[in-house]
Image: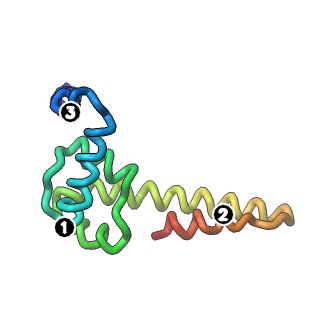
Amino acid sequence: METMMEIRNELSSARNNFKTVFVANYAIWLLNESKGSSRLNKTAQTIMITFCPFPAAIREKLIGNPRYSELLTKYNNKQAQRAKRLTNMVQQVSQRGKGVPQELQDEIAFSKL
């Protein structure tokens, strides 16, 4: 309920324009949050970490911050699960004697970052 009210307030301040809200949050995300200066609410941070993650170097620096540690731990766990699933897929394709597409190998490398 509280999350809905936060989103509703944010949308009403941007005249119900989702694009404006996203661009504003993304700018704050890049300029302030990447340095550990918390400006977004918890809901916006969760969305940004899920869909617009920082590079590995910044994530490593922020994981020590209590505000980000839980979110980044969840993100790292999901990425590890994804990498494992893709690795299993590569093994299945290799066992069948077929070539593994380069895109799949690139995706595994990205998931391990």
Q: Residue at x 52, y 66 (%)?
A: 110
Q: Is residue 10 above or below residue 58?
A: above
- Distance, label 2 to label 1, CA atoms, is 32 Å
Q: Residues within 10 Å of mark 1 (few under 14, many from 20)?
A: few
Q: Is residue 8 above or below residue 80?
A: above
Q: Residue at x 35, y 54 (%)?
A: 74
Give the total of numbered labels: 3
Quadrant hosting residue 69 = bottom left
Image coordinates for residue 51, horizontal then vertical, percent: 40, 50
Instruction: Find out whether the residues at labels 2 and 1 contact each other: C-beta distance under 8 Å.
Output: no
- Distance, label 2 to label 3, CA atoms, is 39 Å
The residue sitting at the right extreme is 97
Q: Quadrant of the N terminus?
A: top left
Q: Which residue is tagged 3? A: 14
Q: Circle 3 sits in a helix, a strand or a loop, which is it?
A: loop
Q: Residues within 10 Å of mark 3 (few under 14, many from 20)?
A: some
Amino acid under disc 1: Lys
Q: Is residue 16 left or right of residue 88?
A: left
Depth check: give the residue in front, 10 or 37.
Answer: 10
Q: Residues within 10 Å of mark 2 (few under 14, many from 20)?
A: few
